[in-house]
Amino acid sequence: MSAPPLWTIAEVARALDLPGTFPETSIDFVTQDSRLVKPGSLFVALSGKPSGGFVSSFASERDGWEFAANAETAGAVAMIVPHRIEGVSVPQLVVKDTLLDGLWALARTARARFKNPVIGLTGSAGKTSTKEFIAAYPNAYASPSSFNNFWGVPLTLCNADPQATLWVVEMGMNQAGEILRLSKLAQPTIAMVVNVEPVHLEKLGSLEAIRQEKISITRGLPEDGVLVLPAGIDAPEWVGRVLRFGVDAEVKELSHTARGESWHVSAEICGNQLEFTLTPGAPHRLQNALAALASVHAAGLDARRLAEKLGDVGIMSGRGVEQAAGGAILIDDSFNGNPASMVAALESLKARSMNNGRRIAILGDMLELGVDAPAYHEALAEHLPGIDGVYCVGPLMRHLYDLLPVGKGLGWHENPATLEPREIAALLKSGDVVVVKGSKKMFWVNRFVPRLVAALQAKA
């Protein structure tokens, strides 16, 4: 017996409270991107400039409805649009605001019909990695990629498998108040804050304001929901049950044994001991794994079923993926960078067992840290013993470079856009292990690591 469709056109029309009769044509995928449309899709024509007071760094002068013909050609069976579009023959579901009256309304219906646990998570760093750990639970459904904003969260809900054992919904922010709105939309039964770190300081002003923003995820929790928190983070705003993970918490590591670059971990979950394995980068990922186990336990599910899967969870692109090139090993951690994740990357590098190579860090600016940005960059010097060489990129990283002892500083380059990978490749030797880490604009957007790989291969 085949599974029922994700939606039908008639169901979508009812969710949007539209009058009239609509066909029972199946819909298997919901997207706002005409380039991702495939046969059986519902295309949501969002405005190029976000409505609802939301902010996007990817705002466009063009609106989604301008691509309606492309979506139909690609196989869309229906579309949500702000007005009727000439030349489109598939059913058009017309609403005033295709984001709030369209996508968000459909997401509310999707959430209302799902009765199993929903884990909502946020945090300053490691959200996506933690989400991927939880998603390893049998028959779980999780947000794809980093779908954690005002369109990513409702798309996650609209596409989530109604038959899944649990849903995992990642939530991020571009401005104060966004996590609260996303949580009220997702209505998690378990809310988790992975960590609270000095990220978005320019926008929020203080670490306490960041804590309040992250804890606002509880505004979508029911009274009998559970808040999962790291040890040491308080949440006086929430009066319900709290489950903590980390040192001396209810969910904690008991011991670990290194097996090459992987770890075999013994942990305790509310008095019960279990074992699991973590892939390379284990020091970087242990807290995320404990957070995932805590959230699954809080949801009333068997944490052992997740533990046995953790060793199979790979590392997402830009978040610690390793590859060999020109005799060196590159660790691509360039997707983003903040003080906490930068320290974690350095500690993970220092934990590497070495033969005859060096531990090298290529570090780019950590952005959005406000007036204290220079001090945060200087503080990284405390974590460099055990690192053999450091190359700094960006004006803020000059503060760290000036503190490096003779022989440890490999160089400084102010503008990441003009940094030539072959200059870095010339500094590296066979056997070196190299981590590349910085805010997204430093290395990720200009594809520095793939270009460095090419330069190393050409050098070899």
Image (cartoon, grey):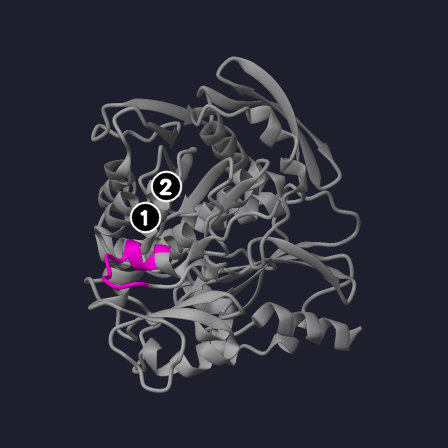
Quadrant containing the N terminus is: top right
Q: Residue furthest top?
A: 271
| Cα distance in 3D space between marks 2 and 1 | 6 Å
Q: Position of residue 366 (x, y in %)?
A: 41, 59
User: In screen coordinates, is 180 left or right of 110?
Assistant: left
Residue 386 visible from this viewpoint = no
CB atoms of marks 2 and 1 within 8 Å:
yes
The one of 67 and 264 positioned closer to us in this rendering: 67
How many numbered discs sit on the rendered protein?
2
Measured along the vertical axis of the image, is residue 403 above or below residue 3? below
Q: Amino acid at mark 2?
A: Arg
**Category of crowding for the residue at label 1, using alpha-carbon neighbours closer than 10 angstroms: few (below 14), some (14–19), many (at least 20):** some
Q: Secondary structure at mark 1?
A: helix
Q: Amino acid at mark 1?
A: Thr
Q: Residue furthest front?
A: 21
Residue at the spot 53% in from the left edge and 61% down from the top edge: 334
User: In screen coordinates, is 186 left or right of 453?
Assistant: left
**Category of crowding for the residue at label 2, using alpha-carbon neighbours closer than 10 angstroms: few (below 14), some (14–19), many (at least 20):** few
Kindly identify which numbered label has been placed on residue 113: 2
Q: Dividing the picture into quarters, in which one does residue 248 lie?
A: top left
Highlighted range, magenta: 11-21
Q: Position of residue 265 (x, y in %)?
A: 64, 27
Q: Secondary structure at mark 2?
A: loop
Residue position for label 1: 109
Q: Position of residue 133 (x, y in %)?
A: 55, 40
User: In screen coordinates, is 36 left or right of 188?
Assistant: right
Can residue 389 be found in the magenta stretch? no
Kindly identify which numbered label has been placed on residue 7: none
The one of 190 and 366 positioned closer to us in this rendering: 190
Q: Position of residue 6 (x, y in %)?
A: 47, 53
